[in-house]
Image: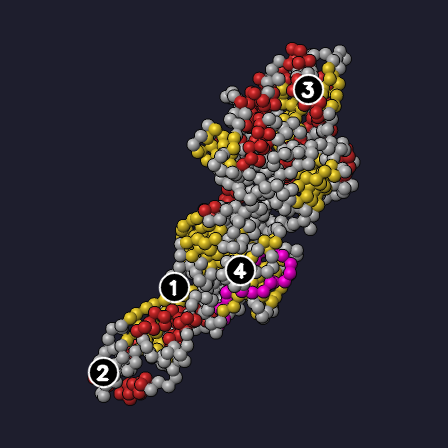
Amino acid sequence: MKNRSATRVDRGRRALFTALGAAAAEAFVARPAQPLGRAPLGGTLRLSLPFARGPLDPHAADDPLVALLAPAVADTLFALDAEQNPHPALAAELPRAVTGGTRVTLRAGLVTARGKALDGRDLVFSLIRARARGGAAVLAELPPPVRDPSEPLAALFPNADAKAVAGALASPLCALVPRGFDPKSPDATGAFRAVPSPTGFVLERNPNAARGPAYLARVEVALGGDLAEALRAFESEHADIGWLGAGLYRARAGAVPFQGPNLGWVVLRTGHDAGRWSAPGLAQDLADGVPHAPLAQFGLVLPATARTGTAWGGGNADLLVAASSPQLVELAKSVAAAFSTQAQRVSVRPVPATELAERRGSNRFALMLDFVRSPGPPGRATLLALLAAANPALAARPPRAPSYDPTDIARTLPLGVLGTLRVSGARAPNVHALDGFQLGNVFIAP
Amino acid sequence: MARLASLVLALSLTAAPCRAAPADHLAACARGPSGALSELACKLARAVAADAPNAVVVGVAAPPSSATPFKPGIAVDMAVKVALALGHGASAWPLGEDRARLGRFASPRPLVVVETRLAGDAVEASAQVFAPRAAASEPRTLAPIGDPLLRVAERHALDAEARRFLPPVPIALREFIRLGASDGDVVALACGDLDGTGVFSVASVGRTFVTFGTLASRKYTPGARREERELAPVAPVPLREPLAAAWITPERALDFGSSDRAHATRFAAGRALGLDARLPWPGGGCAALDGLLLSPRPTACTKDEPVRSEALGSEPFDAIAGGVVVGRDGSARVVRAARRAADGSVVVADGSHSARLEHAGAQLALGDLDGDGAPELVTSLDTLDPKADGIVVYSLTGSTLTERFRVVVPAGVKALAVCPEAADRMAPVVMATGLGLWAVR
């Protein structure tokens, strides 16, 4: 026989467990789980990544390494919650409609990792800089920001909608950097301070981080190797993350698979040298014709619905690709193989990033495998990103799109989407919170 | 016999020998940590002092019952305390009296009748001042005592000083109660008597809002909310995983703060005051950030306030708790607890003793659950998996921590607070979980 108090306890526990199921669903759609114990502080995360060493420019939209690491170094003015609503991050408040426009005000007391105090001048500098680079995708629709004479920490967007401003400034392509920013020695307010090292970068915890210093003391990023080298480093326990796999020859013992966020899209561009094959829409038809199987192993998330594509018929051609990204080079080899026949040969030609940018700008190429960084959550940001990748002017007056599926959007553009580049692979078992690949949140369990 | 008793009373009061020594008692009644009975006595004395010079203070005792469970001894105890607080020639009647006998009291000095009772989970004391009246030559002709010149009443949460007149309660889990929904980002909780009504206020400190509610018996009623950005700006360098603390002080203020904000806030009588420190340290004083952690050395919350205790060791902490624990003698002491970030151990100290718990979670709370004057430490478990979380209750006796019970909380514990003591059961432990606010009692 149960006594009364025991019965009450059981009923309470049942209520707690029953409610647990209901709230789990709520938490899934509402907000990420909150840690209960404390995330351990300190430790070093070792990364071996198949990318060449290069500048770390948060405003660049064409570099997968930047998409991966820049959010650890530079922060956005606003952040998006689970419902994609912006809320202030480096901004003191949501954009405010004032006479003459919309005001964005920085939080007081912001200081970069190298000790530079930030104010409205840095805000305007950052946004003008971003607008001239990858940030054009989300900023082109807005008027250029100007200094707010009445508020030293603010910038004004003349005649702009406050909600649109907040949405745009939540993009990582509009991160805040100080005046005089040098991407070779990046300095901002992120969880880490990037310091060039002989092998790549060292990300050191930023004690001035405006959104909180990182849990890890440092991240050692070894660059310059290829995919095999990155996998070998993980297998031999010289790295804590296996890029695209758990080992080169065999899976590392205890390795845990992980999937990170989508970094952006791998696109096939057709340029002036492709002649009639550079017509809008043909690039997507060509991308649809590339067999999926060889691409998936290189971290590409392929379109859900396979379409019958068009075979390349433009004769011998070079397929340009950034030499700094061995992963893209491997993907380019698969594309070139698919386009090559006995009658025509498509050759992969890795070129430096600067040359790739120059060719892209001048349209002097036949085929190019390129990367377009995602500026925000799926939806309209996808449209803006692909428009800007084709021509930044298009993003200033975006058309109404019946679909935000990237392959549908690309059917009107001189580029085709091969697939989405996603961070995936394996992690050492003591490395945690990698899912979002927000390195500031990553910690190493003792 | 009755005639004789009346005469004895009259004579005794005329020549009462034990008078309280003159002192600045009323000044000593100033706000500050002390036992419930001592504070009530001070407040009553302060209220009646002008109308009762050289008073005789009589405690009224009712026989213990379910409605009035206090032991009769509380009547004399309160009478003595009020007399001492009155000072200036006041004296206490050495017996607990009942109401029927009060009519026979005849005194050339003002009579202060003190009555103590339970009001819910609070102790309520009242004082009535009666005018002096001469003893009658014939007791049957003594006029009725009449209406009091003045009546005042005060309430205070129970503590060990008052609880020694109540039957003991065990530290044992009797029930889980879901109090209600809470913000999903609660980082600190406080529970206490914020407005002096004896009803517990529960303050939930989230990352955006601080929410007030009341807890009466099993019923939680949400109340006002304040947006934290109205109270304190965002810290230039907040922490990724916030450190936070909150408590309701003996002065009935809510002190709260988190590493998200540039400074902590004190909420009292509906007004907010910015403190000079980042976090309050429950029990008294404040805490400063030391890099990504908390300094072990308590600091002053404002430049006018003293620092009330020594540093707890030399290593930084990632969680702090504390409280003012009242002993059975009414003396109050600050007890602090803190979790060392380096190894997850928790140190508890009260100034004369300290104890160490080898491993605990990052949610801590301190209070006297059973009202015996010895504090209890409540901790979460050291896990990042909500399903594996729970709370453990330890009693601190001298330098020894003894586990009393543990409860699985599969929704995860985000914050903890111990409420003031209850009359007939263990003091409630309030917790913020992934499923809202719950209480264990």
Task: Give the label, 1 or 4, closer to the camera.
Answer: 4
Q: Which residue is mark 4?
A: B300
Dot 4: few (<14), some (14–19), or many (≥20) neighbours within 10 Å? many
Above or below: residue B172 compared with residue A192 = below
- Residue B142: mark in rendering: 2
Q: Is residue B167 visible?
A: no
Dot 3: few (<14), some (14–19), or many (≥20) neighbours within 10 Å? some
Q: Position of residue B88 (x, y in %)?
A: 37, 78
Mark-to-mark CA distance, 4 and 3: 64 Å
Q: Which residue is mark 3?
A: A359
Number of dots carrying numbers: 4
Q: Secondary structure at mark 1?
A: loop
Q: Same chain for marks 2 and 3?
A: no
Q: Which residue is mark 1?
A: B120
| Residue at the (44%, 33%) spot, across then down | A97
Task: Give the label, 2 or 3, closer to the camera.
Answer: 3
Task: Give the label, 4 or 3, closer to the camera.
Answer: 4
Above or below: residue A343 compared with residue B94 = above
| Residue at the (58%, 27%) spot, across then down | A131
| Labels 2 & 4 near each other (Cβ < 8 A) | no
Mark-to-mark CA distance, 2 and 3: 115 Å
Q: Report the amino acid beneath label 1.
A: Gly
| Labels 1 & 2 near each other (Cβ < 8 A) | no
Chain under label 2?
B
Residue B140: in magenta span: no
Chain under label 1?
B
Q: Report the amino acid beneath label 4.
A: Ala
Q: Same chain for marks 4 and 3?
A: no
| Residue at the (52%, 21%) spot, across then down | A397
First of labels 1, 2 by sequence position: 1
First of labels 1, 4 by sequence position: 1
Which residue range is magenta in the image? B308-328
